[in-house]
Image (cartoon, rainbow, N blue to C red):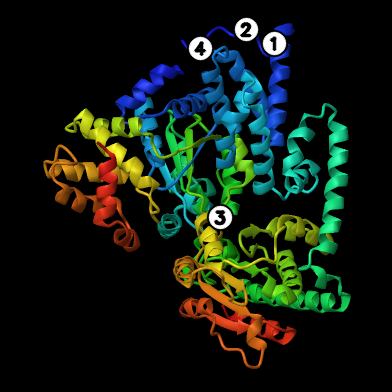
Amino acid sequence: MTMNLPELSLKLADAGYVADRELAMALHLMELLQRPLLLEGEAGVGKTEVAKALANVHGTTLIRLQCYEGLDRAESLYEWNYQRQLLAIQARTASGISVSEDDIFSERFLLERPLLQAIRQERPPVLLIDEIDRADEEFEAFLLELLSDFQVTIPEFGTIKARSIPYVVLTSNGTREISDALRRRCLYHYVDYPSVEREAAILQRRLPDIGASFALQISRVLEKVRKEELRKVPGVAETLDWAAALIGLEIKDLHSNPEKVFDTMMCLLKTQEDKLRFTREVAERLLGKVA
Amino acid sequence: MTCCTPPAEPGSLDPLWDAILGRMSAFAMLLRSHGFVIGLRENADAARLAAQLAMDRPAIQRTAFKALFCSRVSDWKQFDELFNSYWLGRGMKKLLRVGGSTAASTRPCSLASTGKDNGQSGSTELGEEVSTPSGMETEDGATGKSEGASRTEITSSTDFRKIADPRELEKAHAAAERFARAMRARLTRREQARSRGRRIDLRATIRRNVGVGGIPVNLRFRQRKPKPLRLVVLLDASGSMQMYTAVFIRLIHGILDNFREAEAFVFHTRLVHISSAMKEKNAKRALERMSLMTQGVGGGTRIGECLATFNKWHAKRLLNSRSCVMILSDGYDTGAPEVLASELKRLRQRCRRIAWLNPMMGWDDYRPDAKAMQAALPYLDLFAPAHNLESLEALELYLARL
């Protein structure tokens, strides 16, 4: 069942994700063309959230594979439960029952890892392959094969075909260049820092207590902060933290209590260097620009 | 609302549909010429989309094609402009310039496409050339032009003059080869030392002991596969380094030929990524391409600012905990030493080692008195001379120990 574009945007909003039109289209195409989606963008712009919201929209499970250096098939696809197999063999030999190969290499002893789990679901799940750039090139090549055929061959067990094609979302932070082959296979969306309006909408969606004008004020300040020379540019997560802090301190307007506002602005900064650079004057200058 | 009835099925003989398909494959060609990676499957999918979505609305068409055809940030940033110019006929002039320069800066590696070399050599003339109606002529013209330009470049540019000296050249290349070989030998040693490890590999153990009835007599272990050290070389090509650049460039060429993971940059007043040129097998062609890329070499040096550029745009992608950054410079910096110090500090946090090779150190009465050098010293793991072949050989040993 494919839903059309406006319907998808609405459902995303219900799931708590305010998507721009381009992202909504990319998610729509994912379903239409049955292709994976590659999301790139700075840390903290909500790449992982997209997958969560998508799972929510389709009312399905989210299966997550966090990539890291040295990730291999045994940890991403399947592994035999050797300990149990050995125990089973010994227990049976001790009690004089013959052990057949089919018993040992059966479903019972198969450990499903995220990738196998994802293709064996009855309903198509959302498969999030997080930070693919951290995995090795070898893993990427293997993934490419899986994403084109959606079937897995286990030598002792046979070929497992996908029961349903999962919605695959890949994210990358750009610590390593991803191969052209994988890029080509995927739809692409670059997640940028949200526009002022979108960020305000996100704030209102996530923090219902916040007023419309206050949300807009906060996102205007953030727009200015992101233009400063910072080592770690604050993402949406930081904005939410800051807004939550302000609400917690019962501040309703950024100009009402400069002292507290400045103190809470430290939510946005994540390195010592940025904290030193972000002086009271800088904060005042930024706040001053936002009427 | 967005899904309307398709104008025709993608296989039918409707002339209107054929025209649309023709336009779309021409669009794909345009994108390819701007560095997009688009295969046949993308074309087929685009046709499917055209049949299924309301393609009379450009906004929908644009967002759909954007997700489909883009595959990296550089594509993403230039797509809208390309789309508008092709389908809506807007902003053509500006677009061509943007396209040419992006192609030149992001993917200068595809040698065969002379059109891109053209983008580097004469970007001011690009507008005229692209608008020439017959494609073949344009390409031929461009080839002749860029080759001619590069030849005059090598003879006239003072920095690469030394390269013409064949004896010096041979020696340097041999040293570079040795250097790279030492690295390879080290890697093989490490790969072999893997018979015992930290974790038992049950799969391999059982496989191994089939002969004794599955009883694990011989244990097999697993260990992490060691990955090669990544080397990033930053070469100072300013006027004061003139006498040494030639040798160092050959050295870099040797390194990039043999290491699996190595990147090279040249800097003077700005930073230029030269890896793609250096990966050229033929040394002479590599040099030609590099000289094209580094026009303007030989002025003052702004080491700090170049490092800042490196930190900002390349460090995250190129450096990891197994990286060694090698700076080849005499430390005569026209920029502020504070900038250099803070950038080196930042760099230090990203990589494993920073080695600074200073050819001046070989001079008898040299002391690192230059302000920049003073500022840099606290952040360096190795500060060594590099004025002759012996000093380069000593470096082999250092890198082998990393």
Circle 4 residue: B3
> At x 69% / y 28%, what residue is drawn?
B28
Are the residues tagged 1 and 4 within 8 Å (C-beta)?
no
User: What whole-number distance in Å separates the C-alpha atoms at marks 1 and 4?
Assistant: 17 Å
Q: Secondary structure at mark 2?
A: loop
Mark found first going from the N terminus, 2 or 1: 2
User: What whole-number distance in Å separates the C-alpha atoms at marks 3 and 2?
Assistant: 45 Å
Look at label 2 and name its amino acid. Pro
Same-chain status of marks 4 and 3: no
Q: Secondary structure at mark 3?
A: loop
The image's mark for residue B305 is none
The image's mark for residue B7 is 2
Q: Nearer the viewer, residue A71 or B17?
A: B17
Quadrant of the snapshot with the C terminus of chain B: bottom right
Badge 1: residue crowd in 10 Å (few <14, some 14–19, many ≥20): some
Look at label 3 and name its amino acid. Asp
Chain for disc number 2? B
Residue A205 falls in image quadrant: top left
User: What whole-number distance in Å separates the C-alpha atoms at marks 3 and 1?
Assistant: 44 Å
B154 in relation to A259, above or below: below
- In this image, A129 relative to A155: left or right? left
Circle 1 residue: B17
